[in-house]
Amino acid sequence: MKPTVDLLLPGLFDRLSDWDLSYAEKPEAPFLSTLIRGAARTCIPAAGFERGLWNLLYPNASTCQELPVGRLLSGLQGQVVCRADPVYLRQGISDLVLVEGSQLSLEPDECRLLETLIDEYVQPVGGRFSWHQGAGYLALSDAPPLISTPLSEAAGEGVNHRLPAGAGQRWWSRFLNELQMLLFNSEINALRESRRKLPINSLWLWGGGELPASSMSPHYDGAVTHDNTFAMAMVEASGIPGVADFQTGLAQGCQRLLDIYPGLLDAARYDDYAAWRMHLAHFDQQYLPTLNAALQRGEIGRLSVISGGWRFDIRRFGRYRFWRRPRSLAAFCQ
C-alpha cells in the first residue's frame, strides 16, 4: 500500500463564515478549494486543535470527555493532574477575554518565578506545580473532577461560559480566585511590568482527565509538528518519531504520516484577518502544492485535510471531478 498523509489544519474554519460576510475581499484559497471540491467529505467528532490532535493520535481511546493531557505530558501524580497555562484576562465589552501564552512572551526567568510561586502555594495541601516543555502543569491530591475547555477553544474568547463546569464548579471557581489573588501583587508581575508586558493574572486549567484503559497504541509512524510546542509534546509522549517535513518522512519509509500545520491558528484565535490571509496564502501557494505534487506522482496514496470537525479525503484523480461545481472556501464549513 502507498503511504497516507493526514494534514491537521487548525484555524481554517474557525471564523471563516464571519469573515466571509464581513469583508468585501473574500477569504479564498483557490488551490485548496479545488482539491477539497473533489474530495470525500466526512464529519468527525473532534473540532478543536487539542481534541482533534488527540483524536488522530489515539483513535481507539478518543472518547474522553476531559482530555488526559496533564497525566500524559507531565509525569505528575495526584487526584487531578491538568495543564495550567499562564494567561491574561482582559476586560471585554461584557466578559473577560482570554489572552494565552503565545501572546505573552514569557522569558525563562519569568517561568521560573511562576513555577516557584505556584508550587510553594499548593505544596502545603499536597499539590505540585511544574513548568515543563514550555507549559505549566498542576497536580492536586484532593480536588473534584475537572470539566474544562481546552486552551485553543478559549483563546481570544470570553471566558464566562468556558470556566470549569460540572459538580466541582464552585470548588474550581474558588481555587482560581485564590490563584488570581496570589498573582496580583507577585514578583513575576512586578518584573513583567518593568518590562512593559501584560501581567499574568490567572491560570487556565484544562486537560485534567484520566488516561483511558483502552489501547493507546499510536496510529502513525511519523509526524511533522512545525515546532508547535503542544504538538511536539503530544507526539513525543505517543512515541511517534518526529520528522522535519513530509518529504523526509516519506524518504524514511513512513506509511502513515501526520502533518500538523498550525500556522492559521493564532490569527484565527484573535480575529486577525490580515495575518490569517497571509498564512493561508503561503499554505495555498507554497505548502499544499508540494503535497499535492507527491500525490499526483503516486508517492502518496491519500491526502486528508482535517479541520474544524471535517475531514476531506483527497485522492490522485479527485481534482478531475469537473461535475462538482466550484464553491467558495466558506461553503465547505457549512
Image (cartoon, helix red, strand yellow):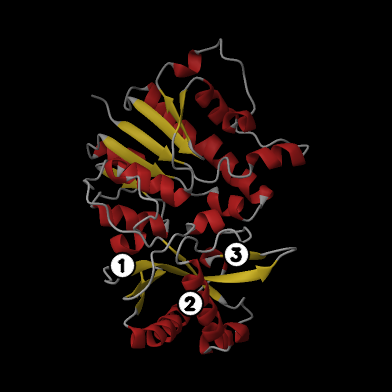
Regarding residue 294, the answer to whether it shows in the image is no
Which quadrant would the C terminus be assigned to in this image?
top right
* Tag 2 secondary structure: helix
Amino acid of disc 1: Ser
According to the picture, the residue beneath numbered tag 2 turns out to be 175
Viewer-proximal residue, 318 or 53?
53
Marking on residue 98: 3
Tell me the residue at 44%/42% (across/down): 46
Please tell me in which quadrant of the rendered image residue 210 appears: bottom left
What residue does disc 1 label?
Answer: 74
Q: Is residue 244 above or below residue 71?
A: above
* Residue located 54% across and 50% down the image: 265
Does residue 156 appear to the left or right of 70 in the view shown?
right
* Nearer to us: label 3 or label 2: 2
Q: Which of marks 2 and 1 is nearer the N terminus?
A: 1
Q: What residue type is labelled 3?
A: Leu
Residue 192: image location, x then y, percent: 57, 82
